[in-house]
Image (cartoon, grey):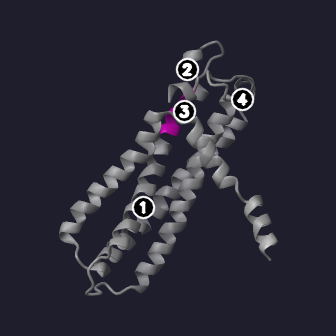
Amino acid sequence: MARGIRKFIKANDFHWKTLKKYWKHSSRSELIVDLLFPLIVSIAFLFWSSIFINDFGVLISKFRDLSGQVIAAISILAGFNITSITVISAAGSQSEEFKKRDNEEGQNLFDMLIVFFTWAVIIQLTVVMLSIFLYYLGSLAPSSLNLPVPYWGWACAVLWLSLTIHSIFISLRNIKTLYLFVTYKPGNSSGIPPSGR
């Protein structure tokens, strides 16, 4: 059985490989905007919320309401990123141009483009899955538990909110990348999407 589990994990390690490539292809400023800024915003938002929310049931209820809207919004963004991958892959001569070119660090430009959009889809579907789970749990929990919010409850809220904001920021940058890719003209190295991110 352990061997079967190892085979399953090895066959489905696509997420981790994409995360490694996303980390490798991202600049320091991109990682700050993509990861650190959403974390800071989430902590600030939830710190402010902790002043008004001191019941665990109320926190669950608020996040249940928010998660219903997040499911719809993030699903649309995931659809945009999947469509963008299709557009980039079917772009013909432009795709071929990018498959032949590497950036200064020797990284293939086409691979970089696909990784950014693929990571966006992975993180957005993860957010949708977590939001469905949160919505379901929130529907079962009473509106008031008369319990203080535990630290792990705030930590889960920070993680979920950070991932949600992270997925939105990636899509915002991917919109710019798609624009630069579609409007790219051969010979214009300054307009290469990854370097213009």
Determine which residue is flagged by label 2.
191
- Say which residue appears at 57% left-offset and 34% top-offset: 178
Marked residue nearer the N-terminal end (4 or 1):
4
User: On the rendered structure, is 2 left or right of 80?
Assistant: right
- Say which residue appears at 18% left-offset and 67% top-offset: 51
Determine which residue is flagged by label 1.
159
Which residue type carries mark 2?
Gly
Quarter residue 8 falls in: bottom right
Determine which residue is flagged by label 4.
95
Quarter residue 155 falls in: bottom left
Q: Is residue 174 magenta?
A: yes
Which residue type carries mark 4?
Ser
Task: Identify which residue, 113 or 34, lies in the foreground.
Answer: 34
Determine which residue is flagged by label 3.
177
Q: Is residue 167 above or below residue 11?
A: above
Q: Helix, strand or loop at disc 4?
A: helix
User: On the rendered structure, is 19 left or right of 147?
Assistant: right
Q: Is residue 43 above or below residue 189?
A: below
Q: Is residue 50 above or below residue 89?
A: below
